[in-house]
Image (cartoon, rainbow, N blue to C red):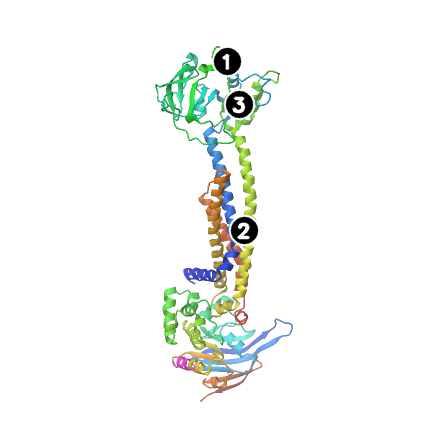
Amino acid sequence: MNRKRAISEGMHSLIANRVRSSLSVLGIVFGVAAVVAMLAVVEGARSDVLERLSRLGTNVLFVLPSEEGSSSTRTMQYGDAIRLENATEMIHDVAPALLCSTQQSRNVIGVTSSYMPIRQLALQGGRAITDLDLKNRSRVCVVGRDVIGDDRKSVGIGDVLHFENQMYQVVGVIASVQSRRDRSLSSLMRNHNKAILIPLTVVPKSDGVIQDAIPLSEITVRSHHSEYLLPLSRIVHRVLQSGKPNELSVDVVVPRQLLREEQHTQLVFAAVVGCVAFIGVLVGGIGVMNIMLANVAQRYREIGIRRAIGATRVQISSLFLIESSLLTILGGIGGILLGIAASLLIAEFGGWPIHISIWSILLAMGMAFAVGIGAGWYPARIAANLDPVDAMRRE
Amino acid sequence: MEDTTNIVSIHDLSKVYSETETKVVALESINLKIDKGEFVAIVGPSGSGKSTLLHILGALDSPTSGVYMLRGKSIASMQDKELSKIRRSETGFIFQVFNLIPQLNVLQNVALPLQYSGSSPEEADSSSSECLARVGLSHRKLHLPSQLSGGEQQRAAIARALVIEPTLLLADEPTGNLDTHSGDQILALFEELQAEGHTIVIVTHDKDVANRADRIITICDGKIMQEVSSS
């Protein structure tokens, strides 16, 4: 039988029983919607993690002063960073830094020459802070794109900025960085568009102290390979903390692990929604099978007539398989639209990143189609195996 | 043994239903030949086996034993798929209750057998239109069966049987659900079709209907009791 005509016949039959059809397919609609939403969240979480990791660097860890017992311990110092850098071959380089002030429009950070490469910052113009700046204690700075000057205008190379009674000449501008709020990494993912980088040796707190004693608020450690990060975090503890009273106490943060924990929440959500989706599709499939069985029972006589005028068993079963798969495909389309809407709501009100990929749509569609074939199979078989003469006699 | 003028050749054919514990013999040792262009009536009381014989002739049912040759093809041993093919290429069946599919319009109903044999929708529609014109229903093509009178429905059903240009036209009480006038029109149509060369087998218990046939076969308790040829 001509495929187009067979499909249009199936469509007509569904429309003739539109209330029954749409009720029976509700399970499929919700099941498919849950699948689409689940995949959107999983994919969103995955691409978000990858994106954030790529911005922080996949092979860095952060050393921060410990939040516990800070009163009894000494502060982290420049000398600690040097000790760390020389401690093991696994370390590529370190970037000690001191966050001097966080105002609305400017974050002043004392840095060394390794800060920008480790933080993956590029220059838009001018030059970076060099080792020579540190050695000579030059009062220079590299600024972010959004830094506002003393005259409330944006800042360019050659301008002079005032900060805690000192003047700093702008020697470089950082290329624009895509900034975004980041809950779990907020302290580490600072907005460099508003940053003012100055040599660590000219921060106000370094006045009158030897270079090794300059206080630090963080040390970023870059390893040669991301595999080294876990052993490296143990080495960092061992090198920096002796355990004696009045000694240094630090926390080591590996972004990878932090993100993994956050991702875990989203994956638990996805698993729950996945179960709902599975149950929805299962129940939906049973609903469709039920309605198709009723459909076959109602049309015994028609089946008999069709057989009597020459339809083969295959042609009879495809009559019902086309109907059940049309039903679930339409339900699938409804479910995809509902799922996209639900994902957008999750993104809007839950604040979770979502990503609706084409393959998740295809998967949902394929699932709906498979349920249609699966649920239609048994009723279609019953229809195909009816004896033509018997079937025509039944009412 | 085969005579080329014989469209139907049945030899020692039996049909036994054994679904329940007791066997029911519907047909027993039937021997029958039907020539091309013949108009045959099968008569007999209810339950005599005449409908079963017609179903076997129309490849809707298979005999338990015996030989049934239709245009030289052995039908008795065929599998379901081949029987389906016989039904959509060799035999046109007409029922007492018309048996049109209610949700399809008249044209779609008539075109259905051609659709099943793989004709394109356009071919099927044009052949169906010709057949509807032949039975005088051109003006009813796009109506649903429920919008037609009984006589018109039966004519549509005849068009559906004719559309495959069947070797054998089979009718089971075709006038049983019609008033006298409509019944007469249908019988007149059968006579015209016979004149055009169609071979027709009709089951009836109406004597007036049977008398219009070339030959009347009387069946009782599954056996042929009598064969009378009208002069």
Report the residue that reaches farthest toward the right: B21
| Residue at image location 53% in from the left, 20% down from the top | A88
Label 2 Cα crowd, 10 Å radius (few <14 / some 14-19 / many 20+)? many
| Residue at image location 54% in from the left, 31% down from the top | A258
Residue A395 is situated, as x and y percent measured from the top left of the image, at 54, 70
| Lower position in the chain sequence, tag 3 or tag 2 | 3
Report the residue that reaches farthest toward the bottom: B231
Quadrant assignment, res B63: bottom right
Q: CA distance from mark 2 to mark 1?
A: 65 Å
Q: Amino acid at mark 3?
A: Val
| Lower position in the chain sequence, tag 1 or tag 3 | 3
Residue A195 is situated, as x and y percent measured from the top left of the image, at 43, 24
Residue A111 is situated, as x and y percent measured from the top left of the image, at 45, 19
Report the side of B19 relative to B174 (left or right). Answer: right
What stretch of residues is rendered in magenta? B187-195
Whether the magenta-drawn stretch holds residue B190 is answered as yes
Task: Indicate the chain on which mark 2 is placed.
Answer: A
